[in-house]
Amino acid sequence: MILISISAPDPAFLIKPTIILPEYRTVSEGYSSLVIPCYAEGIPVPSITWESLDKSSIPFNGKQLAHFLVFTNVSRIDGGHYMCTAKNKIGTDIKVVHVIVREKDEKQIAPLIDAPSTVQVKYYSEGRLRCNVTGYPTPLVKWKHNNNVVQSSGNTLVINRVTNSTTGTYTCIATNVAGTSQANIQLKVTYDVPKIITPPVTSVIMGGHSHNFTCIATGHPEPNIKWTYKM
């Protein structure tokens, strides 16, 4: 007897997983069924895993069915953040959905933002931009810099080192199921003016000899030092 083992060849090309998942889902308490799909593209076809970020495990009335996260008879305990992980042989992608469970007949409030119009920060120091956001359900906050999306979320945006390239208009955008609000903050940089801390010392030099003069200055940005000669 001859046994022949045949395995499927690898695809001609491989693609890392990419997940398509909403950032939040809102549902009323007592809703009969909540189904959240986690769609993932990739070659080979990615495997899908769901887990809770706020609890040790998915609540007892929730379970994973294929790429779906399913809750029956939704209760307040089901609210929270759930992470979908898609994995294949060449990579992994992760996305998180925020499940918001509202009480029956609960009033929704659109986001309101309280933020300063201008923030000034010293050159090359840390900058913090803060939006005080209210609303119900709790709004999701995103940031843009000069209309470009910033990879950060939350009410406070931290810029580690403020330079000329990080100044400009920052937009705080708050969104929930009741609406969207946004506010602009102008980030401006201030400078430390140049200050000479070690000036050149008047010296008497014999003809034909060389001499070094020292001039040390502080300031941000770092000052350019120029020398002039007058008879």
Image (cartoon, rainbow, N blue to C red):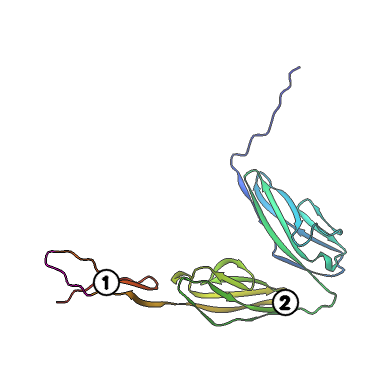
Residue at figure coordinates x 76%, y 56% from the top left: 51
Q: Nearer the viewer, mark 1 or mark 2?
A: 1
Image quadrant of residue 219?
bottom left
Say whether marks 1 and 2 touch (CB < 8 Å).
no
Q: Position of residue 131 (x, y in %)?
A: 62, 77
Does residue 204 show up magenta in the picture? yes
Identity, as a three-letter code, of the amino acid under mark 1: Lys
Segment colored magenta? 202-208
**Image check: 110 left or right of 198?**
right
By secondary structure, the bulk of the magenta-drawn segment is best described as: loop
Front residue of 214 and 59: 214
Q: Residues within 10 Å of mark 2 (few under 14, many from 20)?
A: some
The single residue placed furthest to the top in the displayed view is 1
Q: Amino acid at mark 2?
A: Ala
> Which badge, 1 or 2, is on the more N-terminal residue?
2
Per the image, is 28 magenta?
Answer: no
Residue plotted at (82% across, 64% down): 78
**Which numbered circle lies on residue 178?**
2
Determine whether 13 is above or below 122 in the image.
above
Q: Quadrant of the N terminus?
A: top right
Q: Position of residue 43 (x, y in %)?
A: 64, 45
* Residue at the spot of label 1: 226
Residue 12 x/y as whole percent: 59, 39
